[in-house]
Image: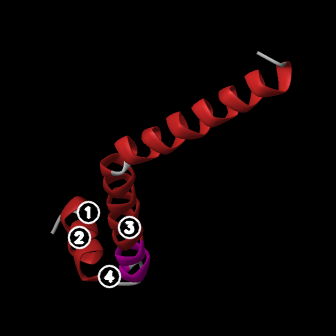
């Protein structure tokens, strides 16, 4: 076997980094799921901020005497 083939076979059989790869894939899944959840909740968050902003704006005008 040539050195490249030997390296590929050794790399294929070696499972020393398997846990690291599994944890990385799991973390990637959680990050993508979190982004999907946040993306789907964006309209609700925008509505909450708009309501809070309107209440603060109204309170500001009441405090100014308008």
- Neighbour tally class for label 3: few under 14, some 14-19, many 20 plus, Cα within 10 Å: few
Q: Residue at x 18, y 65 (%)?
A: 5
Q: Tell me which secondary structure the magenta stretch mostly adopts.
A: helix
Mark 4–mark 3 Cα distance, whole angstroms, equals 27 Å
Asked whether 62 or 28 is in front, the reply is 62
Asked whether 14 or 38 is in front, the reply is 38
Q: Which residue is mark 3?
A: 30
- Residue with the most extreme top position: 66
What x and y, as percent, mark residue 29?
32, 65
- Neighbour tally class for label 4: few under 14, some 14-19, many 20 plus, Cα within 10 Å: few
What x and y, as percent, mark residue 44?
39, 47
Q: Which residue is mark 4?
A: 14
Q: Is residue 22 magenta?
A: yes
Asked whether 1 or 46 is in front, the reply is 46
Mark 3–mark 1 Cα distance, whole angstroms, equals 39 Å
Q: Which residue is mark 2?
A: 6
Mark closer to the chain start, 2 or 4: 2
Q: Please report the bounds of the magenta region as a residue range.
A: 18-23
The answer to whether the residue labelled 1 contacts the one labelled 2, judged by CB atoms less than 8 Å apart, is: yes
From the image, state whether disc 2 or disc 3 is nearer to you: 3
User: To which quarter of the image does residue 65 belong?
Assistant: top right
From the image, state whether disc 3 or disc 1 is nearer to you: 3
């Amino acid at each position: 076997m040539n050195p490249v083939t030997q390296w590929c076979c050794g790399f294929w059989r070696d499972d020393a980094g398997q846990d690291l790869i599994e944890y990385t894939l799991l973390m990637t899944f959680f990050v993508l799921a979190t982004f999907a959840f946040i993306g789907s909740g964006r309209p609700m968050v925008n509505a909450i901020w708009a309501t809070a902003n309107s209440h603060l704006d109204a309170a500001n005008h009441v405090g100014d005497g308008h």
